[in-house]
Image (tube, rainbow, N blue to C red):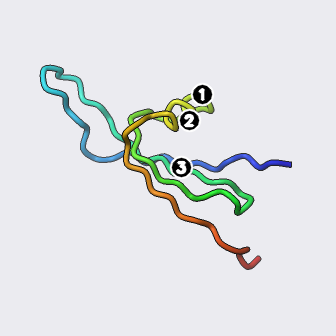
Amino acid sequence: MPSRPARLLGKLHEPMRVRGDSSPIKRYVLGYCGHDGTTTITLKNVATRVVCQNALGVALGEKYRAEWHILQQGQGAA
């Protein structure tokens, strides 16, 4: 049975500003991985606040964002 991915969202301190628009753009770092040890742990800079599965799909589809992958190796001790 496939496991559901775990996710964690952190808000970055400084919002991004676009010239000519006074509204700030909040920035987040999304971390996610599977519980089965076969998927990488991924950290991604996103502009979408992830609160549900649909928002997760939007955040994962964001292009041109910094992204880091950490490979899981072996089984952890119980």
Callout 1: few (<14), some (14-19), or many (20+) C-alpha neighbours within 10 Å? few
**Residue drawn at x 51%, y 51% as measured from the top left:** 31
Q: What x and y, as percent, mark residue 5? A: 67, 48
**Residue drawn at x 73%, y 79% as measured from the top left:** 77
**Could you say which disc has been placed on residue 56 in the image?**
2
The answer to which quarter of the image holds residue 65 is: top left
Q: Secondary structure at mark 3?
A: strand
**Residue drawn at x 44%, y 34% as measured from the top left:** 62
Q: Earlier in the sequence, mark 3 or mark 2?
A: 3
Tell me which amino acid carries mark 1.
Asn
State the residue in front, 22 or 57.
Answer: 57
Q: Indicate which label's residue lies in the foreground, 1 or 3.
A: 1
Q: Do the numbered discs 1 and 2 sit on residues whose CB atoms are within 8 Å? A: yes
**Residue drawn at x 74%, y 59% as measured from the top left:** 36
Tell me which amino acid carries mark 2.
Leu
Per the model, the C-alpha gap separating discs 1 and 3 is: 15 Å
State the residue in front, 23 or 56.
Answer: 56
Q: Earlier in the sequence, mark 1 or mark 3?
A: 3
Q: Do the numbered discs 3 and 2 sit on residues whose CB atoms are within 8 Å? A: no
> On the image, numbered disc 3 is attached to which residue?
8
Q: Is residue 15 left or right of residue 56?
A: left
Per the model, the C-alpha gap separating discs 3 and 2 is: 11 Å
Q: Secondary structure at mark 1?
A: helix
Q: Residue furthest bottom?
A: 77
Q: What x and y, as percent, mark residue 25? A: 29, 31
> On the image, numbered disc 1 is attached to which residue?
54
The answer to which quarter of the image holds residue 68 is: bottom left
In this rendering, the answer to whether 51 lies above or below 21 is below
Q: Secondary structure at mark 2?
A: helix
Q: What x and y, as percent, mark residue 44? A: 44, 48
In this rendering, the answer to whether 51 lies above or below 28 is above
Per the model, the C-alpha gap separating discs 1 and 2 is: 5 Å
